[in-house]
Image: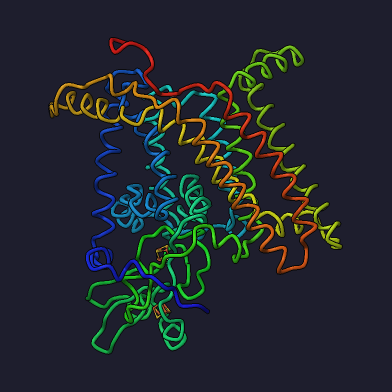
């Protein structure tokens, strides 16, 4: 076990703030207010996507800033997630509702992978990005789902097994330059209560876990809701950066340490379902971008003639299924081939588990490149849309300047995307060969690398096509 080197919690103001009991609430409150503003403008504002706070904040800024935060710091959006403010009402509701345990068969990432694919299909089918009203309903649905799951199941169930956004953040934050860990693992060996995961309450006899002292009348510090045990953490997967562990540990032994970005790809051992999450996020990200270029419409037209149908649901569903099926089949086949050339014979999913880690850097690059495009095509539009929404609320902050909404740094877009995809490929290659060297399977890594090179080329081709500038104001300011 290694001690983490630089600990961000040692920074005077930051450390103090994050140890404060209400620090998470302080982070959640601004996002809750923004969500309420998005709801108001989505339901009652002008139903023009590039001029509505709901669509601009959710589809341009939230997604773009999320990836940026993950890349430079960590899973900050889960840390500040306003959905968990349903916790107050759910604690009340829990008194009257049966308490269920999440089915054992669903304690993995397969359910959330399925939800993510359904969500991406719905996004495209209903053009969620173009409808402030539907975007507002999506926010309501998200809060409703968080409430229902949190009221019926143990805390943490929603984040770990249900939330597509949270799991997207978990997968991408495997690239982050920071991670929770133990300052001194020796202290953890002597720690009786394992409070970071079991929670803590201070009694006159000393610290006890929440279960040991359920009625003690003293401040209670919950432990990790996603059941991560600090000295064993090797990955950001399932970590919401809630800092519960920091506050619950009576020995001040939790660190928020810096690490090399992507280092965990070289070291961590992911379970099968987690590997599938990375693989499917890459292919889903590709499909999401592909759905916005002319080639998609040509393909849909051809398929429409072939199947003799104009049903958009059928055509879109078929293309999604074909691409995902093709991606999964090819990826399994290439993994088996990589094993064979390394002298191994294993079942296809075991081969995928061995090599699948390389899809995490690719998935990160795919989504970062795509979201960077949308964010940069509308980065300044948040100012006039927020001004307009506040104006509707009777809180004038100046007249909206719509010329800001059409500031698109077009010359930068593609070069930036190319740089991001190359970085992803470089990360995947380093991960592959570093792991393969340890296991004496360099020939197998070369096979996977060749496959990733083809995927990266395809990705660059998609990103090079004229892409719909969804949610961006490109017309005259009088639109
Ligand atoms: S991090 Fe703190 S609470 Fe958790 S095992 Fe280590 S010493 Fe105990
Ligand atoms: S309590 Fe769990 S989820 Fe929260 S920061 Fe600590 S390890 Fe991460």
Residue 61 visible, this orientation? yes
**Looking at the image, residue 459 lies above or below residue 331:** above
The front one of 384 and 341 is 341
The front one of 147 and 319 is 319
The colour scheme applied to this rendered structure is rainbow
**Looking at the image, residue 182 lies above or below residue 174:** below
* Residue that appears at 14% across and 29% down: 397
* Residue that appears at 50% across and 69% down: 233
- Horizontally, residue 349 falls left or right of residue 13, namely right
* Residue that appears at 70% across and 58% down: 353
Q: Position of residue 81 (x, y in %)?
A: 35, 49
- Horizontally, residue 160 falls left or right of residue 58, namely right
Quadrant containing the C terminus is top left
**Looking at the image, residue 316 lies above or below residue 177:** above
The front one of 93 and 474 is 474
- Horizontally, residue 396 falls left or right of residue 263, namely left
* Residue that appears at 86% across and 61% down: 345
Residue 151 visible, this orientation? no
Q: Where's ligand 2: which quadrant?
A: bottom left
Q: Quadrant of residue 436?
A: bottom right
Q: Position of residue 391 (x, y in %)?
A: 17, 24
Q: Position of residue 178 (x, y in %)?
A: 43, 61
Q: Position of residue 243 (x, y in %)?
A: 35, 64
The front one of 396 and 149 is 396
Figure disc tally: 0
């Amino acid at each position: 076990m290694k001690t983490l080197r630089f600990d961000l919690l040692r920074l005077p103001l930051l450390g103090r703030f994050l140890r404060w009991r209400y620090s998470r609430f302080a982070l959640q409150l601004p996002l809750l207010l923004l969500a309420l503003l998005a709801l108001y403008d989505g339901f009652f504002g002008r139903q023009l996507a590039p001029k509505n706070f709901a669509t601009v904040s959710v589809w341009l800024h939230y997604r773009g800033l999320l990836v940026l935060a993950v890349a430079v710091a960590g899973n900050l959006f889960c840390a500040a997630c306003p959905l968990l403010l349903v916790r107050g009402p759910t604690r009340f509701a829990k008194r009257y509702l049966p308490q269920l345990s999440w089915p054992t068969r669903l304690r993995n990432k397969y359910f959330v992978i399925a939800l993510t694919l359904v969500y991406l299909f719905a996004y495209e089918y209903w053009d969620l990005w173009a409808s402030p009203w539907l975007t507002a309903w999506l926010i309501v649905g998200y809060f409703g789902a968080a409430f229902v799951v949190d009221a019926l199941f143990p805390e943490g169930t929603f984040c770990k097994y249900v939330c597509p956004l949270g799991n997207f953040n978990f997968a991408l934050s495997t690239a982050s330059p920071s991670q929770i860990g133990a300052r001194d693992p020796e202290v953890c060996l002597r720690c009786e209560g394992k409070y970071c995961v079991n929670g803590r309450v201070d009694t006159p006899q000393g610290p006890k876990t929440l279960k040991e002292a359920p009625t003690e009348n003293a401040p209670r510090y919950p432990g990790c809701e996603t059941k991560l045990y600090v000295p064993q953490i090797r990955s950001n997967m399932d970590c919401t950066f809630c800092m519960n562990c920091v506050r619950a540990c009576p020995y001040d032994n939790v660190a928020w340490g810096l690490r090399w970005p992507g280092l965990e790809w070289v070291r961590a051992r992911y379970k099968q379902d987690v590997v599938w999450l990375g693989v499917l996020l890459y292919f889903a990200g590709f499909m999401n971008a592909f759905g916005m270029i002319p080639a998609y419409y040509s393909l849909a037209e051809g398929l429409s003639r072939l199947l003799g149908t104009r049903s958009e649901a059928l055509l879109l569903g078929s293309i999604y299924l074909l691409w995902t099926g093709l991606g999964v089949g090819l990826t399994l086949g290439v993994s088996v081939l990589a094993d064979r050339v390394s002298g191994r014979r294993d079942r296809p999913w075991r081969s995928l588990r061995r090599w699948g880690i390389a899809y995490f850097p690719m998935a990160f690059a795919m989504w970062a490149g795509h979201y960077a495009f949308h964010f940069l095509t509308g980065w300044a539009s948040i100012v006039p849309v927020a001004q307009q929404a506040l104006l509707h609320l009777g809180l004038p902050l100046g007249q909206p300047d719509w010329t800001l909404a059409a500031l698109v740094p077009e010359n930068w877009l593609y070069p930036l995307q190319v740089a991001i995809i190359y970085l992803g490929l470089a990360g995947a290659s380093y991960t592959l060969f570093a792991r393969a060297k340890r296991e004496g399977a360099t020939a197998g890594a070369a096979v996977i690398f060749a496959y990733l090179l083809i995927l990266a080329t395809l990705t660059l081709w998609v990103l090079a096509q004229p892409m719909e500038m969804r949610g961006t104001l490109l017309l005259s300011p009088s639109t």
